[in-house]
Amino acid sequence: MNCIRFYRSLIALALVLFSGLGAGYAQQIDSMLNLYGERYPQEKIYVHFDKPAYNTGETMWFKSYLYAGILPSPISRNFYAELLDQNGKVLQQKIMPIYESSSSGHFDLPANLPPTVVFRAYTTWMLNFDTAFLFTKTIRILNKTVAVAPQAAPAAIPQGGTAKPAAGAKPGTATTAAASTVPTAVTLRFFPEGGDMVTGIESVVAVKVTDVYGLPVNAEGSIKDNTGATVATFSTTHDGMGRFTLEPQSGKTYVAEWTDEKKQAHKTPLPDARTTGVVLQCAPTGSRQAFIIKRSQEAPENLKTLYLLGYFNSQVVYKARLNLAQNFMVSGSIPLEGIPTGMIQMTVFDADWKPLAERIAFVNKEDYFFTSRVVPITKSTERRAKNTMVIDVPDTLRSNLSLAITDAGLTKADPDADNIVSHMLLGGDLRGYIHNPYYYFTGNDDTVRAHLDLVMLTNGWRKFKWDDLAAGKLPVIKFPRENYLSLNATLTGVLQSQVPKNTQLNVFLQAKDSSRQLFFLTMDSTGKFQQEGLVFFDTVSVFYQFNNSKHLANKAVVNFTNGTHKSASTIKPDTGWRVPMPLDTSLLNRGKYFASEADRLKVESDKKVKTLEAVTVKAKQKSKQQQMDEKYTSGLFSGGDATTFDLTDDVAAMGAYNIFSYLQGRVAGLQITTGGGGSQLQWRNATPALFLNEMPVDVSAIENIPVSDIAYVKAFRPPFFGATGGGAGGAIAIYTKKGGEGSSSTSNIGGLDKSRLTGYAMPKEFYSPDYSKETTDASLPDVRPTIYWAPYILTDKNNHKLTITFYNNDVSKRLRVVLEGMNEEGQLTRVEKIIE
């Protein structure tokens, strides 16, 4: 997918056919729509979880992917994740840095969780727009779940999509059809194509039948007018959806008499037809999107000249002035060349540029996928057996992947369920629940396309406020783009007039591992001090001092914040939080088995701890690498995904010109060029961060250090979150030799005032045992439900293969492997395999 070619095609496709009075309005809406797309791109999120359901006491692992339009999002730097109960109470919240349009994190699940929680994720940029499109997922807590008989659906729970706006209605409003007149848990809703039925014009009407959980129900029936005559019949053809045609007559009302799949009879009235108006009908025809527009025979003047606007990703791709003065119907087609896979939106306006009808259609060019492979090398589901597999992305583009390996009994096989492909291309832009969304990407034949078009007819979508665009009004941005964390300081206790201009505040940030950063903050015109673009975790101590201002030191109180959004303690429940569907019995039983085993093992472990209190245990001797890590590293520099070098007894290091010439060719993916102009480093097309004894430095500070003075080197693969900006190029940490003295860092900095500041949620490393090295108590079973979790698998043209090694637990005989991800051009991938 070539982005430049795509946008050139958009320009070529825009057919400017406007003239006369309408041209001014057209130019205004056209330019505003394009400006909206350029300045205010809409972000969407998909989250890959290690598994779909959990027990208390477990860890929920997740990896998020962010898009803006059709490409990975460059907008946001902070990712917000929350666990809510179904009343909207925030149970936990975490903030994580975004790296390469993605982020990863975890929630430890306490014992007091309710049976169902809602995972909610967003960026502050998304809060500026329709919050119905924030990512939410309802998650079951298995060991808190009991069987519950179905109840009637609450009014607030949606039974499908949002109906289309009435003709002439303000976009965002919905045509509401009455529910069944018989008390039941099954609901039928009607969705006239384009928004409304119009008297005297044949219209397509879609239907959607759902149960209390929003799940599809098969149904069939007939449409009768108020005289009892049958004027149409219908039946659901796919996942509770179907369609029929009807030409409403003046003075007539209509009702559907239908039976559901359990042969229960129902009656549901149809929405009233408008006396005059416009009907928009669409159908894909190969490389073009065909449309038919009809108006009422006795139409007012404003319906005799119409305008059709087609747009994709908030960019105008088609526009036409339609003359219906002599004819009541016109047809045409929109060329689709150059438009990639996604939804094209069409809006019909009257002569005064008031919206009359809207429609979305899906364009599937099958260009959204890139190839990735999961190749088992050695596989076994025996107790604690070793497994090896290769992740291969045979492509030159950079890709960003995540991998989950779990007990297959905990992840019910559902090949059509939502995943990164269906959510980024379909679900992330639509309102309402879509059943088995990935089905619509398993083929592109006439049947699948017809079924997908039913989804287009029965779900709402992101809408524009056309009156605002016509008036030249742009969205009000309450939440500006965030640049990672900020060090914000405000003064209280003094008047702003008492603070000299250009007052400077000297600030030290000291982390729990005693690493420090120094900042010199100058007051801006609003009386605030600010430093953006920081990345730090957990809490840090803030030491500060005014530069040459005893008056402020004695009078002013400095308040520090990190610049992140503070979520409310309670969120208004969203209609997207459906009543969760009943769980598969085998999945529920399997989950409860893991929970009961974990509880039993905790009791056994506690007993063994008490027994061992009086026993002297000889510890396993640590490796030289572990000893070096403990002696020299701390905090985020300890452990991690790094290549390490012990130079204390490396003869080859003694002959190196400097440390960079020593590292050349020794770290996969790290490119080092040395020469007269100094050393240059690159890793994944970014410059690695450099640290000397865990303090950030530049190249010149390191390349002049004699190699004989260096004891230990760690090359952290990208990303390294201990670096400012997320460490897109990884990091190289250099440690100089020291004797037996301890660390010279202290927990305080004398003479400076002190405060505290909260950073990002502390990352947690997934534990994957290595049974070839570890000695364990064989009497305590290994019942890990998630066998392996790798949130960041990064590939490029030089490193497109990665070998994964993991060990099975004691009880799983079938393992599910799920690999998902995206590449730098926005293409997606997903691989699912079963090991048994």
Image (cartoon, rainbow, N blue to C red):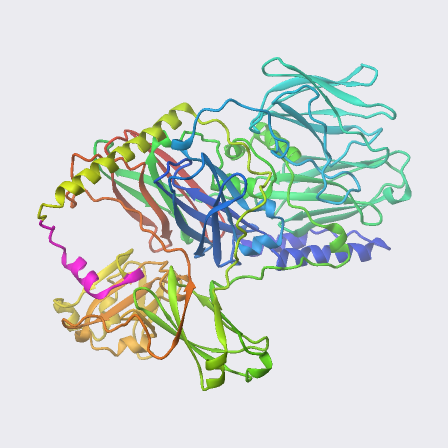
Q: Is residue 593 above or below residue 498?
A: above
Residue placed at 82% from the left, 26% from the top? Answer: 248
Magenta residue check for 332: no
Outermost residue toward the top in this view: 263
Q: Position of residue 762 (x, y in %)?
A: 37, 56
Relative placement, left or right, of 273 versus 406 is right
Residue placed at 85% from the left, 28% from the top? Answer: 200
Q: Position of residue 487 (x, y in %)?
A: 46, 69
Q: Is residue 562 above or below residue 361?
A: below
Q: Is residue 763 above or below residue 508?
A: above
> Does residue 426 appear in this view?
no
Relative placement, left or right, of 131 versus 256 is left
> Does residue 472 appear in this view?
yes
Range drawn in magenta: 618-637
Magenta residue check for 633: yes
Quadrant in the picture for residue 386:
top left
Q: Position of residue 658 (x, y in %)?
A: 23, 74
Quadrant in the picture for residue 740:
bottom left
Q: Nearer the viewer, residue 97 or 790?
A: 97
Quadrant in the picture for residue 226:
top right
